[in-house]
Image (cartoon, rainbow, N blue to C red):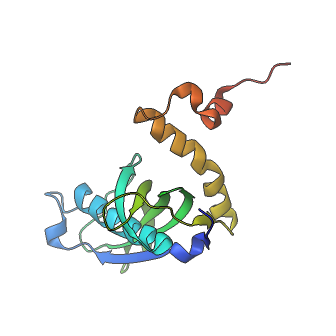
Amino acid sequence: MTKQKFASESLTTMTEMVLPNDTNTLNNLMGGRLLHLMDICAAITAQKHSNRVVVTASVDNVSFSAPIPLGSVVTLRSWVTRAFNSSMEVYIEVHAENIPAGERLMSNKAFFTFVAVDQLGRPIDVPAAVPQTDEEKALFDSALRRRQLRLVLAGRLKPQDATELRALFELETA
């Protein structure tokens, strides 16, 4: 992974309006429809960063903090926080807006992981992500802990080998 790209080069913004076919029986955006939109936005981000076909490897916890009613405008914004060999962590924020009322709220945020693949579907190296803003730097710095947690939960890393996570729990001795 010798090549580098600024995190901002992968920035993707998508905007959708919540229509009747997107809603549940309470006239709110269906969670599955929102996850679909988030996956598309995050995949475009990962493709921009890697210039490759990407596949979704994981989605971290997604909490639905507020319903998004029919007629709302949904804006999804995502960028690559950090790259590891062939995988990329993508941060995504979802805002819902009631334009006539002048109301805007953050509805969701999550981390998706994508793997870049070659023409045969095999993982392929991606450029390093270079953070520039304070927010990008903070997300970059904490990405390794999130990655180790994902790998431990998936059974692909032993907890004792998760050095970044262990450091969070080790107490300093006097």
In this view, the residue in front, 48 or 42, is 48
Q: Is residue 149 left or right of residue 68?
A: right
Q: Which residue is drawn at 47% across and 67% down?
A: 78
In the picture as drawn, the residue positioned furthest to the front comes out as 120
Q: How many marks?
A: 0
Q: Where is 61 relative to 163, above or below?
A: below
Residue 170 place in picture, x, y as percent:
69, 25
Rendered image quadrant of residue 101: bottom left
Residue 40 place in picture, x, y as percent:
33, 68
Q: Is residue 103 left or right of residue 164?
A: left
In the picture as drawn, the residue positioned furthest to the bottom comes out as 100
- The C terminus, quarter of image: top right
In this view, the residue in front, 142 or 147, is 147
In the picture as drawn, the residue positioned furthest to the top comes out as 174
Can residue 111 be seen in the rendering of this structure? yes
Q: Which residue is drawn at 43% across and 54% down?
A: 113
Rendered image quadrant of residue 31: bottom left
In this view, the residue in front, 34 or 79, is 79
- The N terminus, quarter of image: bottom right
Residue 119 place in picture, x, y as percent:
32, 68
Q: In this view, does 73 lie to the left or right of 130?
A: left
In this view, the residue in front, 102 or 127, is 127
Q: Which residue is drawn at 31% across and 76% down?
A: 16
Rendered image quadrant of residue 3: bottom right
Residue 148 place in picture, x, y as percent:
53, 40
Can residue 108 be seen in the rendering of this structure? no
